Image: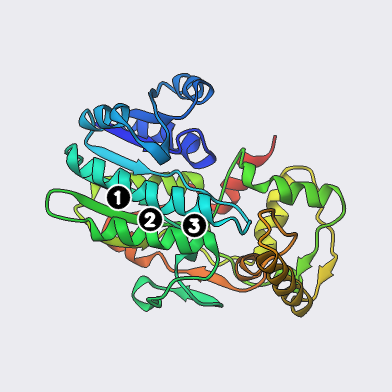
Amino acid sequence: MNLFITGGTGFVGKSIIPILQANGYRVYGLARSERSAEKLRKMNVLPVMDNLTSLSTNTMKALSECSYVLHAAAHMDLTYDKAPFYQINVEATKKLLRLAQENGIAKFVYISAAPVVPGSPIVNLREAEAGSGLPKALYPKTKAIGEQQVLKANSDTFMTLALRPPAIWGPNNHHYEDLLANVKNGKWRWIGGGRQILSTIHVKNLANAVLAAFKSEKGGEAYFVTDGDRRPMRTTFEAILKAEGLDPGEKELPRAVAVIMAHVFGGVWKFLDLKSRPSVMPLMIRLMATEFSVSDEKARKELGYENAIDFNQGVRELVP
């Protein structure tokens, strides 16, 4: 079972690859530099030297050796620079889909994102209840466009499927570096007290969802996948921070103040066409200061998705 993966050296890829290998998959990984290639070799992955934004014959040759694709690479950032979002999340996905079709891939699984659905708050949302529009922020908007391309490409001979994880967590998650830095510097505040529900998924549970997706006979569908419980945002991040030996404290920021700040910063950054990251923006409010919870009942029923790990087990793995 040969599988081609993008994003193999990222947090999600590095965590999922060993689980794929333990389940019999031989993994080919896209590498844009020798440094990335060496990281893949250390994981017993066959590196494919290429760039996601300009895929060449190297990728085509690797795809011809594989039956499966896991597209996990994405540009995820809190900036207003449109170019990399569209180049990586939209155009590169479109080209990879075409090459996968042309080279006989049987199943293409796309790591999408739960925030691709529009609206706020999101409360225990099921796939059939989601709105049909696009979210406003660049990351979820371009991921939604990429997801639409993936699902549209589904056919009897080329099955495609999208997984929609919410906040992904687990050991060695570099996406939490800013969070840890803010706590260490005494800048962390619980927006609105942090009592709103936030769906999450441990990276090992996401790996289980990927395995279920490849084994299923489903195609052309998108699935929310989560840890399966309803948990306040504060419960999650207090546990993660304390496992790192950090105390987030009790300081709070009223939600109304945070919302005003986000829209002011966002407006200024857009007006001045700034490419940097503002300290607060509307997407952060949508995901961190408002309920964002989804139901994965469909994935559990149709794909046979099951948890690999529960919340308390996941927290214990974080302790150094």
Relative side of 170 to 255, left or right: left
Relative side of 12 to 276, left or right: left
User: Quadrant location of the C terminus?
Assistant: top right
User: Quadrant location of the N terminus?
Assistant: top left
- Within-10-Å neighbours for mark 1: few <14, some 14–19, many 20+: many
Determine the residue positioned at 53% across, 62% down: 138
Per the model, the C-alpha gap separating discs 3 and 1 is 16 Å
Q: Answer with mark 3 or mark 1, whichever residue precedes in sequence.
A: 1
* Residue 2 locus on image (x, y percent): 26, 30
Residue 290 seen in the current view: yes
**Element at label 1:** helix
**Element at label 2:** strand
Per the model, the C-alpha gap separating discs 1 and 2 is 8 Å
Give the residue at mark 2.
Answer: 163
Relative side of 289 to 155, left or right: right
Relative side of 112 to 213, left or right: right
Give the residue at mark 1.
Answer: 213
Determine the residue positioned at 51% across, 23% down: 39
* Residue 29 locus on image (x, y percent): 39, 30
Q: How many marks?
A: 3
Residue type at mark 1 is Ala
Q: Nearer the viewer, mark 1 or mark 2?
A: 2
**Element at label 3:** loop
Q: Answer with mark 3 or mark 2, whichever residue precedes in sequence.
A: 2
- Tell me, yes or no, whether the two marked residues, 1 and 2, touch with CB atoms within 8 Å: yes
Give the residue at mark 3.
Answer: 227
- Within-10-Å neighbours for mark 3: few <14, some 14–19, many 20+: many
Residue type at mark 2 is Leu
* Residue 176 locus on image (x, y percent): 67, 48
Where, by quadrant of the figure, is residue 272 drawn? bottom right
Residue type at mark 3 is Asp
